[in-house]
Image: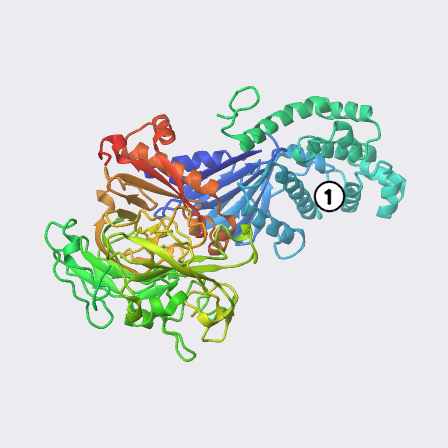
Amino acid sequence: MKQSYFTMEMHPEGSRVAAWEKALEQLDMQLLQIEPGVDTFGTITSTRSPLGITFARLTSCSQELKFDNELPDESVWICALLSGNGHAVDEATNLDLRAGDLIFGAFNELVRLSFRGNCRAIVVKVPGALLKARLITPYRPRLSQASSQDGVGHVLSGFLSALSDTIGKLAEHEIGAIEFSCLEFLVSILVSDARDEPLAGSSVTVTANLYRISRYIEAQLGNPNLSATDIADASGVSTRYLQKLFKSVGTSFGQTLRRRRLERCRADMVNPLYVHLSISDICFRWGFNDAAHFSRAFHDEFGLSPREYRRQKSVPTAQKMLFEFNRGWPNGTGDLIGAQRLGGAGRGVVQPQRLQEYRPTDLAVLSKSSGEGVAKGSRSGSREHYLAVSEKTVHWGYFSKSLPPVLEIDSGDVVTIETLTHHAYDDYEKMIKGDEAAESVFLWTKDRKNITRRGAGPLDASVYGRGAGEGLGVHICTGPIAVRGAQPGDVIELQILDIQLRPSANSDAKGVAYGSNAAAWWGFHHNQLLSDPKAREVITIYEIDGSNGDNYAVALYNFQWTPQKDPAGIVHPIMDYPGVPVDHGTVAKKEGVLKGVKVPVRLHFGVIGLAPKEADIVDSVPPAYFGGNLDNWRATKGATVYLPVAVPGALLSVGDPHASQGDGEIGGTAIECSLTGVFRVILHKKQDHAGKPFHDINYPLLETPTEWIIHGFSFPNYLAELSGKAQANVYRTSSLDFAMQDAFRKTRRFLMQNKGLTEDEAISLISVAVDFGVTQVVNGNWCVHAIIRKVIFGDQQEP
């Protein structure tokens, strides 16, 4: 089974269209044109089955394609449009397509297919030989549309839609059942399409009877005693008439029966599920009584003995499976198979002296602006701004290109941003009480909820009934901040000058900061628990006191989540909605946990992102090209984040503050702890990118004094790649394999474009000097990062 994945993002901007053309050629499709003025985008994920059926998922921008009408065989294609709109045309037919539509045709007919806007489709190519063996007489379909509202077309459309979510993840033994199912669906569609067109030399009645009888035969292939009389009786015709039907199309009942049995045997002989079966077992399985007779018939039909056919077809499959399951390990002969406080009443105010090492002159005393904490930037010279957190300066659980900015700044300006953790209500006394801003943001009583929408779901909670936004997105994000002059194609450089803890305002809390870690239902660990109760969520509260210079977090207690009733009366059996007040009278605290353990503090922001363009309201959880919920602890003081601009103004937001996190974020969260950060924001216009490290980036790029860090995702742009129901599908289909592949491809491109390496040089360097790590496996769109040490190129001396 051959699997492959292609994305334009693998290539520099100037060569993406040419690379896309070559990728389409592998599917026997040709690019006619890409709509002028659109952002070029395209991905192909494909799988080729043992019998030669190709399944390919395409996601692309507006463009026009055509199927290769010069193929020597009579292959047939099926296309299901999963999202978007399109158009298909040949010499006689003109079809407008909408999401869910199913069309098919022959490769040797000239058919043009147009995608309008970003579209997603699955295309299946079925070799003509397979259809010839399955149909009684050859049938070449014209461009046709199968109803996706009822009948077989409806089932096949749903089948292909589900298949598109798993392409690239199918195991060898799974594809066999899928290819046969698809083939049977296609045959049924072709038969339905041909109902009103008689077979060559036959009447409509004869054609209908032949197809009906063929279905009876297919259902009884494993019956060794199947006879023409049995089929005639089941079909309600005489045996003599049945024989005449087959004779009218140049065959016989016996020949048809034998050919179909041989086809099933041939498929089973190369199916990994049946590797334990002998050839005799397989032939008996499909109705042959004599192994010798089967062998002769097989040779006559396919030109090889069954043993030779199985050897030729199975060895490559076995070698591939051995490589996949044992990659990197030697076989028996030794050969390698496959080659981290702010004090006093001014909580949240950063002390100016802490910034001297980052700025050429001292930072003037910062002051909060009145009212909503919004300060306007100047058009000339850089300024300092303070963005205080309040219910009017945050958006909860989502990004949106339609959100009005709460602050507008110029390139080069410095902005101090307060952020709150969405987990503060895990311990109200320590993380909210006495903090006016936090109390404002989290205010939720029976009569009032200061921030209604929490998540990207519907405001009426019509999906799950959890509350407005449905909790489909959880982070409290401060912003958005508009950068004057930013346009799509530009890059935002965000220098993280300082990060400070936001201490507790509770007089009983001694001015230290607190954080919460939740081992939650979305954690990677959740289905692998050893002790009872197996399905449980545990919150651990940490204390962080950096006043003594030790910068450690110490666990205070933990408790198991119990069903919590929110002020609206909705019971939350699990942590399924952010900011639900935890009634500590309903939980059992376990004190003194993690005795003797001190967690080093690594202050960072889990969410640093710009607004994406693909949808108006986007779940804050899955990260992608626009940044967002990266959850990389290296985005800390002294680091710089580069993000591609997708919408005018860029619309920068910061949130999900962390006291510490490990790579992977296995349990679901970090130590979620409110922080205040100081950032310098620099706008790089697209025309000035040449020769810069961020040239041609369409992903979050992180720079530290000693490293370049590249982020690879299961889906680099899941909003476009998965489209339609992307914000749901990304949670179901993410894979570390996909994320690793993306990280590799981006690293290769970075080294070739920015360091002038050849591809072979880049691959060698990646293997011997680049460190890959799992950033997180809990954010829907999983992430693998690649760390390139600058010292390799003499850009930085190792400390």
Judge left or right: residue 748 versus residue 109. Answer: left
Up-down: is 231 above or below 312?
below
What residue occupies the far top of the structure in this picture? 333
Horizontal side of 90 relative to 34 (left or right) equals right
Position in image of residue 554 (x %, y %): 35, 56
Q: Mark 1: which amino acid?
A: Pro
Q: Position of residue 538 (x, y in %)?
A: 47, 59
Q: Which residue is mark 1?
A: 198
- 232 and 792: which is toward the camera: 792
**Residue 741 visible in image:** yes
User: Compared to 715, does 423 lie above or below?
Assistant: below
Q: In the rendered image, which quarter is residue 544 located in? A: bottom left
Which quadrant, please, contains the N terminus? top right
Q: Residue furthest bottom?
A: 447
Q: Nearer the viewer, residue 548 or 174?
A: 548
Residue 617: x and y in percent read 40, 61
The answer to whether residue 16 is seen in the rendering is no
Determine whether, in the image, residue 393 is placed left or right of residue 718.
left
Around disc 1, counting alpha carbons within 10 Å, would you say few (fewer than 14), some (14 to 19), or many (20 or more)?
Answer: some
